[in-house]
Structures are given as structure tokens and as C-alpha cells.
Image (cartoon, rainbow, N blue to C red):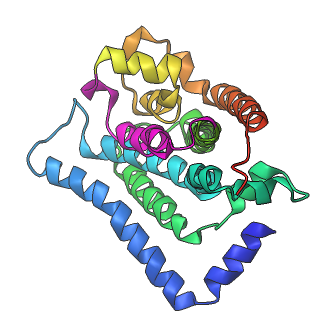
Amino acid sequence: MISAMWIRSTLTYRASFAMTLLGNCAFTGLEFVGILLMFSQVDRLGGYGLAEIAFLYGTAGSAFGLADLCAGSLGRLGTRVRDGTLDAFLVRPAPVLAQLAADRFALRRLGRLVQGLAVLGWSVTALDIAWTPVKVLLVPVLLVSGAVIFVAVFLAGAAFQIVAQDAAEVQNAATFGGNAMLQYPPTVFGDTLLRGVTFVLPLAFVNWLPALYILGRPYPLDLPRAVAFAPPLVAAGCLAAGHLAWRAALRTYRSTGS
């Protein structure tokens, strides 16, 4: 209901919304323009061609765009903790998390999702691979699972903000930074980082591991190809862990009294 209120408010000024959405698409599209500029100087990056990197970019951007649309408002939680406005959410007869996720729901975030899907659509037509039913089905599965993993990271970051009160940039490093990292092939990163985003903060399951199966690329760290089908399980585990962290952090909250 809160989200619907913000959507109605946004659509009251449709021309303004359309311009904002287009501006958001253009702004987020600058990241892909940077990739195109790199490929004007080189033929391959980390052994990957433009269409393959566009596929990584599109899957990462679409998954993150969907998560940002649903849970991006949690990034402001630290400010609400510091100024005491979180108290207002605690006394309302509705789940605190749902209220925070819907607070100031920004429909303009659709721009990132639309732009990511556009690049993904182009990459699918440009890729020179044999599409099997399994590979076709794996694309929507990885998008949904990747979005859930990012939502779990937003949730864990919100829990940390309750404890630390001023940690929005830590959350941004894992969410926006993670999205930026996943746009490039794992071959350009060292094994230490790959282990960290596979076994500690499992961002590799957002798109790298299923995408490598689709692209027919070798797996890093000698991982079995079966991990391509693990994202739904990893997403469920991450969401459960994030929710537990959120509940534990919320129990520690102490009002500022203001």
C-alpha cells in the first residue's frame, strides 16, 4: 500500500517521470559505454568478447536493478537510526522491513533494470553459442536468484546500519560495488577475490557461475559445472541469513529519544 502511494504520486507528473526514467537509463548506460570504449581499443578482455561481456553486464545489471527497485530504500536506514525517525516505523501495525522497503519507493529505479535488460537482449542475439532448453531456462532463473541474493545483501547491510548507525557506504560497496564487479569476467580478478565472492559473500552466484555454463567457459577455482544450478539454493540461504541478521539487529535497536 505504501509503495502504491509513492507510485501514484510519481505518476501524477507523467512527463517528469518519463524524463527522469530516461535520464536514469542514460546515466546507468554510461557504464556500458565505458565497456564499448575499451573494446574500441582491444578485441577481447580477459579472454572474453564484447557479446560475452555484454551478457555478464546485462545479467548483473538486471538482477541488481530488480533488487534495487525492491530493497534499495534500505540504504537510507542509517540516517533514520541517527535522527530517530525509525521509531515511527516501529509503532505502526505493519512489518518494519516492509515499511522501510516501500518508504519513498522510487519508480525511477526502473531505469537501471530496463537498461540492463536491453543490453542483455542484445547480447543474447549476438552470442555465437548453441542454445539448449537448459540454457534458455537458466537465464530467468539466474536473474531471479541473483536479485534475491542482492536483496539479501541489502538486508544484511541494513542490519549492520542499525548497529553501526553510519555504514551506508559499507552496504554500497557490497551492492553497487558488487554489481560493477560482476559486469566483468572472473578471469580479470585474482584467486583471492574469487574465493571471497564465492565462499564468503557469494556474489559469484548472481551471474558468474550460471553465465559461465551458458557461455561454455571454464570455471575458476576448479569448481564443478554443477554449481551453475546452485543459485536458487544459495539465494534461499542468503535470504534466510539476511533475515536472521535483520531480526537480531532490530532487537538491539535503542531509540535516540528525539
Q: Position of 168 compared to 222: left or right?
A: right
- Is residue 174 a member of the stretch shown in magenta? yes
Question: In this rendering, is residue 25 above or below 69?
Answer: below
Bounds of the magenta span?
Answer: 163-189
Question: In this rendering, is residue 84 above or below 145?
Answer: below
Q: Which residue is drawn at 57% across and 44% down?
A: 143
Q: Position of 63 compared to 81: left or right?
A: left
Asked whether 151 or 204 is in front, the reply is: 151
Q: Which residue is drawn at 52% across and 54% down?
A: 65
- Is residue 241 a member of the stretch shown in magenta? no
Is residue 158 shown to the viewer in this render?
A: yes
Quadrant where the N terminus is found in the figure: bottom right
- Give x and y (percent) for residue 92: 87, 59
Q: Residue at x 44, y 44 (%)?
A: 169
Asked whether 112 or 217 is in front, the reply is: 112
Asked whether 227 or 84 is in front, the reply is: 84
Q: Position of 142 compared to 217: left or right?
A: right
| Quarter assignment of residue 55 | top left
Question: Which secondary structure is most common in the magenta stretch?
Answer: helix
| Quarter assignment of residue 196 | top left
Q: Residue at x 40, y 27 (%)?
A: 216
